[in-house]
Image: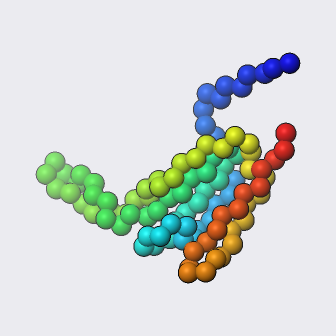
Amino acid sequence: MYAILHETDDSTAVNFSECGKFFPEKGLQIVTVGVKYLRIFRANPYALILKDEQQWAQTTRLECLLDVRLLAPVQSFAIARIPRQYFSLHLNFMRR
């Protein structure tokens, strides 16, 4: 017997989140894990927005560095510190 699953919308709930250095760039990154997604963001302090018609204003914005859709729901989430000031991300998935 076969079943077809078609998800129309992605989940927007955040089940786990943590801050750490996962990529070799300046600053820390924020990891958010939902039921079936993993996203990594960074804070960009040099983002420009249009203030008036001819003036730009500098602000800080979150930029998505990585957006991964997972095939199985995430059961648990752990972060381990490794040498050289980096962090390692560990996910445990639910069995079906």
Does any portion of residue 13 appear in the rendered image? no
Vertical relation: 11 (above or below) 74: above
Extreme-bottom residue of the structure? 84
Residue depicted at 13% across the width and 51% down the height: 54
Residue depicted at 16% across the width and 48% down the height: 53
Q: Where does residue 12 sit, x and y in percent of width and height?
A: 61, 43
Quarter assignment of residue 86: bottom right
Q: Where does residue 49 sit, x and y in percent of width and height?
A: 28, 54
Tag count: 0
Residue depicted at 85% across the width and 39% down the height: 96
Q: Where does residue 71 sit, x and y in percent of width and height?
A: 69, 40
Does any portion of residue 52 appear in the rendered image? yes
Question: Image check: 12 left or right of 91?
Answer: left
Towards the viewer: 83 or 51: 83
Vertical relation: 11 (above or below) 44: above
Q: Where does residue 20 sit, x and y in percent of width and height?
A: 57, 70
